[in-house]
Image (spheres, grey):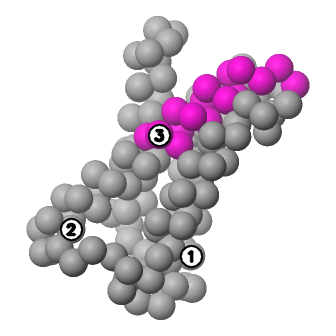
Amino acid sequence: MIIRYNLFTFMWAAVIMITTLLPSSSMPALSIWELFSFDSFAHAFLFAVLAYLMIVGLKKQHTYLKLQHYAIRTALLISTMFGIFIELMQHYFITGRQGDIIDVLSNTIGCLLGIVLFKWIYQQ
């Protein structure tokens, strides 16, 4: 039941994983200032959508009532840890890519924006 309601969350997480773990040769060529702005915005956007989808999925499922009750906290924790995991993967396992603390911060800000978006849409 939890997988059914979080199918879009899992699909979005796969999109994040694929796009963030591409080798640097696959990345678009931009100047350093454009890359910083675009990169931070892209990370925040990806993780805002992830956190939002996860909260919606956890709220809709009825199998695990504690997850339903603590959906926002759970989504924040899981999506933030996922962002840290991806940065560690980039740093240690992807040639030509480096994990960056700024990306972790952007991911976390995105997670918080996803929570704000959820609260704004659902007025909770």
The amino acid type, in three-letter code, at marker 3 is: Val
Vertical placement of 89 versus 82: above or below? below
Query: Residue 89 got which mark?
Result: 1
Question: Does residue 23 appear to the left or right of 2 in the view shown?
Answer: left
When asked about the image quadrant of residue 32, the answer is bottom left
Instruction: Give me the C-alpha separation between circle 2 and circle 3.
Output: 21 Å
Towards the viewer: 24 or 74: 24
Furthest residue toward top? 123
Marks 1 and 2, how far apart at CA: 20 Å
In terms of secondary structure, what is the magenta stretch mainly? helix
Which tag, 3 or 1, sits closer to the chain's start? 3
Q: Is residue 53 magenta?
A: yes
The image position of residue 123, as x and y in percent, is 46, 9
Residue 49 badge: 3
Q: Residue at x 77, y 24 (%)?
A: 61
Q: Quadrant of residue 74?
A: top right
Residue 28 image offset from top left, x and y in percent? 27, 74
Q: Nearer the viewer, residue 89 or 34?
A: 34
Q: Which residue is mark 2?
A: 35
Q: Amino acid at mark 1?
A: Met
Q: Is residue 95 above or below residue 115?
A: below
